[in-house]
Image: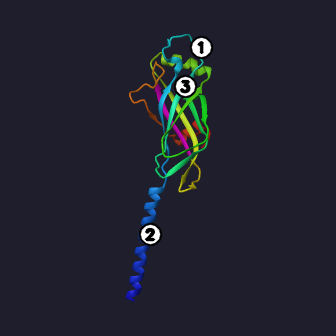
Amino acid sequence: MLECRSFYLWMAQVLFLMGVIALLLWVSLSPKRPTYTIIHLSVPALNGRNTTLPVDDASMNTTVDFWLEITNPNNESGIYYDDINITIYFDDENVGATTISSFNQGYEKSIRPESVYTNRRFSKAVYRAVSSGTMDLKVGVATKFRNKTWGLKSKHHGMDLQGTVKIGSDGKIYRKNKKVKLHHTPKKWRLHFTGRD
């Protein structure tokens, strides 16, 4: 009887130890989501220009140039991205978009310089807004990705992110820290920014 109890106690200890090991492995190997940061954003048409120009100026075709830094925080897991859709919003209106084609990322940071060509309505609004000080642009990022750990790919994970970038009269980010980290889009805004739940 005593031997039977010792056996069950030993089995319980083994199962408990295996559970703890499995939990630690799961926590240590569960991949973290990549982070997205705007490290540069500018509206070149404003750089050195007179912001009191008439709004019908024919040269007011506007682009928004930016660098998107994508960081993989995992040391043991690569990331396979689907196309990354980037949209620029002004006054909650979509004024331009671009797409970064699908790619694979190792363990290093990836910096993607991109340009978004905006509509003429935005071009006029830019001059009006910046002439009074600063303006806010929202950057929305939507994509899906898979992690690859030890040769095995995970299921697809979705990401819907957004960030607000304040632009000064020089057409550049208006703050001392020139980086803007993108955060998860609140669910109530997800349909508005990405067109899906």
Q: Secondary structure at mark 1?
A: loop
Question: Which comes sooner in the sequence, label 3 or label 1?
Answer: 1
Please state the horizontal and vertical placement of residue 106, each as a whole percent of the image. Answer: 52, 46
Residue 64 covered by magenta stretch: no
Residue type highlighted by circle 1:
Ser
Proximity of marks 3 and 1: CB atoms separated by less than 8 Å:
no
Looking at the image, which is closer to me, 3 or 160? 3
Instruction: State whether residue 147 is above or below residue 138.
Output: below
Which quadrant: the C terminus? top right
Name the residue that disc number 2 marks: 18
Highlighted range, magenta: 158-166
Q: Secondary structure at mark 3?
A: strand
Residue at position x 44%, y 69% from top?
18
Please state the horizontal and vertical placement of residue 23, each as a whole percent of the image. Answer: 44, 62
Name the residue that disc number 1 marks: 59
Q: Which mark is residue 64?
A: 3
Residue at position x 40%, y 89% from top?
1
Please state the horizontal and vertical placement of residue 71, each as a whole percent of the image. Answer: 48, 42
Q: CA distance from mark 3 to mark 1?
A: 15 Å
Instruction: State whether residue 178 is above or below residue 79.
Output: above
